Amino acid sequence: MKKARSRKGDGRAEARRLAHLVQEAIDEGADTVEEIHRSIANLPLDVLERLDVFEQTVKDVRKVQDTSIGAIYSLIHKVNREVGKLATELL
């Protein structure tokens, strides 16, 4: 009986470890996608910035873009943490 409990506990620990591993993978993936997103989004602004025609407009757009992209990925990380907490509690 004691071994059965031990195995059940080992299974739970393994499930929690796996949930944590998945959560870390999602965070790392989101960070990578955010970097790519920012790079691609900056391409047209970099071109406009070199033209020196819309200098202030480009600065304003960069601020809005940076804030928007940051908010999106911040939310993804927050949801991931909450799902991780829920998974840990359930396991």
Image: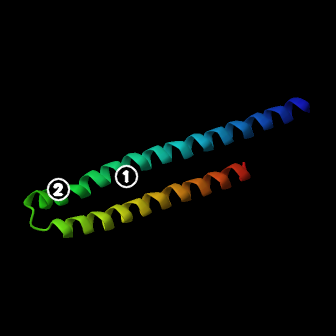
Q: Nearer the viewer, residue 31 or 11?
A: 31
Where does the image place residue 45, in percent across and percent down from the top left? 19, 60
- Residue 60 numbered mark, or none: none
Image position, residue 63 (x, y; %): 31, 65
Farthest residue toward the right?
1
Q: Quadrant of the N terminus?
A: top right
Residue located 9% across and 62% down the image: 52
Q: Nearer the viewer, residue 11 or 81?
A: 81
Real-space Cα separation, disc 2 to disc 1, in angstroms: 18 Å
* Label 2 vs label 1, nearer the camera: 2
Q: Which secondary structure, mark 2? A: helix
The answer to whether 41 appears left or right of 55 in the picture is right
Assess disc 1: are there few (<14), some (14-19) or many (≥20) residues with their C-alpha within 10 Å of its C-alpha. some
Up/down of 50 relative to 91, above or below: below
Three-letter code, disc 2: Asp
The front one of 14 and 85 is: 85
For disc 2, the marked residue is 46
Rendered view: 1 above or below 46: above
The image's mark for residue 34 is 1
Instruction: Give whichever of discs 2 and 1 has the lower sequence position.
Output: 1
**Could you tell me which residue is drawn at 56 percent across and 46 percent down?**
23
Is the Cβ of the residue at disc 2 closer than 8 Å to that at disc 1? Answer: no
